[in-house]
Image (tube, helix red, strand yellow):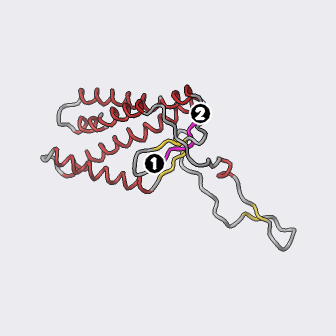
Amino acid sequence: MIYWATACLSDFAHLCSFQVDSECIPDEYFSSQVVSKQKGNPMEAPSISSSPKPSRPPRILGTPLDIAPGFIVNLFAIWVGMSWYMGEKHPHWDWPIRIFTGALSGFALIVADVGHALAHSISACAAGAPMDKVQLTSGMPRTVYYADAVSPRTHILRALGGPLYSALGFMLSLAGRSLFPPKSIAREVAGWS
C-alpha cells in the first residue's frame, strides 16, 4: 500500500521527464551467427567462429530485462530486512512465521516496483513507441528508451502505464487491508505491497 501510493505520486510528478541512453543493440545481433573463412582447403565448409555467441537477454512481455547482480543482492536484503522488521513489529510470532511473512512482504514490494516499470512497457507498446529495455539494478528499475524523440502526447501515453498500475495496486491493497483481520499475515503483506 505504501509503495503503490508513492510510486503513483512520483510518476505523476515526473510525467514529462525524458531519459536518453546509449545505442540500442538490435535483435538481429542476437540471432545472427558469425561465419569465418578457413585457411587451407577451399573445399571445406566454413565453420562457425570460436567466439562465444552472445546470449539473448531475458524478456518479459517482449521487453528485454537487464538484470544487474545488485538486484539479486537487493532481493536478499529486502527479505532479511522485512523478516527482521516482522520480528520487531510482532515479537510473539515464531521465527518461521517472521521469515515467511518477510518473504511475502518483500515479494509484494518487488512485484509493485518491477510491475510498475513493466506497466510502462505495456503502455509504451500501446502508444506505438516501445521501450527498449528495463534495467533491474540495486536501485529502482529504470525504463530505457533509445529513440526518445516522440511527441509529447506519445510520451504521456507511454508513461501512463506505471501510474495506472500503481493506482490499481493501491486500491487493491486498501481493499485487502479492510477485508483481512487485524494482525494477520495477509493484512501485513497487503500493507507493504
Which quadrant of the view contains residue 147? top right
**In the image, residue 101 above or below residue 54:** above
- The picture places residue 170, in percent across and down from the top left corner, at 33, 30
| Relative side of 47 to 70, left or right | right
Q: Count residues near mark 1 (Cα–Cα under 10 Å), then give few for <14, some for 14-19, many for 20+.
A: many
Question: Separation of disc 1 and disc 2 at Cα?
Answer: 21 Å
- Residue depicted at 25% across the width and 30% down the height: 177
Q: Nearer the viewer, residue 17 or 99?
A: 17
Q: Which quarter of the figure is the N terminus placed in?
A: top left
| Relative side of 76 to 126, left or right | left
Which quadrant of the view contains residue 2? top left
Which badge, 1 or 2, comes first in the chain's sequence? 2
Q: Callout 2, which amino acid?
A: Ala
- Residue depicted at 64% across the width and 52% down the height: 30
**In the image, residue 105 above or below residue 6:** below
Which quadrant of the view contains residue 55? bottom right
Q: Element under label 2?
A: loop
Q: Residue furthest bottom?
A: 40
Q: Count residues near mark 2 (Cα–Cα under 10 Å), then give few for <14, some for 14-19, many for 20+.
A: many
- Residue depicted at 32% across the width and 53% down the height: 77
Q: Is residue 44 magenta?
A: no
- The picture places residue 29, in percent across and down from the top left corner, at 67, 52
Q: Callout 1, which amino acid?
A: Leu
- The picture places residue 15, in percent across and down from the top left corner, at 46, 31
Q: Element under label 1?
A: strand
The span shown in magenta is: 129-136
Q: Which residue is mark 1?
A: 136
| Numbered circle sitting on residue 129 | 2
Q: How many marks?
A: 2
